[in-house]
Image (cartoon, grey):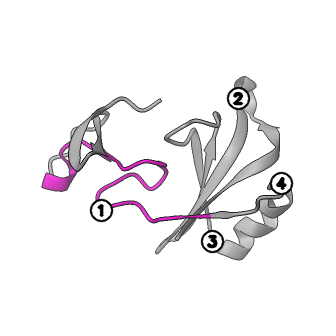
Amino acid sequence: MRKYAYLKEPLERGGGDRVFKVMLYKAEEGVYLFEYSNLDAVRCSADFLYDSLDDLHEEWDELIDERGWIDLDDPLPDCQHDAFIPLRVRGRDAGKPQWGEFETLEDGEWIDCIPE
């Protein structure tokens, strides 16, 4: 399960960074909260792990704008959980990941991608 939401007001983080939207992803080990420092960001700028959905909602629900939590499909196999587009590390599907090199699915083909 994945959901994302926009914040009522940007949340200030250290170093002048600001968080504009967040995504939650429920995994076996808990619930991840991904923060995005740009409204158009494809990948997160920070992530946190919560023990439960209740814990995450308790901390974040009052910061979310009137649209609330918006459902988002789970990522495709081998793709990044925090990405809003199909995005995977090149070679991950073959068991030979090339860390730092990404590809995305476009028109049914995996092509090189440099996510911002």
Say which residue label 3 marks.
Answer: 51
Say which residue label 4 marks.
Answer: 63
Please, what is the three-letter code of the amino acid marked with disc 4? Leu
The picture places residue 52, in percent across and down from the top left corner, at 64, 74
Please, what is the three-letter code of the amino acid marked with disc 2? Asp
Q: Which residues are magenta?
A: 71-94
In the picture, measured across the screen, residue 91 lies left or right of residue 101, that is: left
Q: Is residue 68 at all visible to an observer of this figure?
A: yes
Residue 92 sits inside the magenta stretch: yes
Sequence-wise first label, 1 or 2 = 2
Residue occupying the far front of the picture = 107
The picture places residue 86, in percent across and down from the top left corner, at 37, 50
In the depicted view, which residue is nearer to us: 35 or 40?
40
Sequence-wise first label, 3 or 2 = 2
Judged by depth in the image, the label closer to the viewer, 3 or 4, is 4
On residue 17, the disc is: 2
* Element at label 4: helix
Q: Which class describes the residues within 10 Å of circle 1: few (<14), some (14-19), or many (20+)? A: few
Q: Name the residue: 80% across, 55% down.
A: 64
Pointers 1 and 2 in contact (C-beta within 8 Å): no
Sequence-wise first label, 1 or 4 = 4
Q: CA distance from mark 3 to mark 2?
A: 26 Å
Sequence-wise first label, 3 or 4 = 3
Say which residue label 1 marks.
Answer: 77
Judged by depth in the image, the label closer to the viewer, 1 or 2, is 1
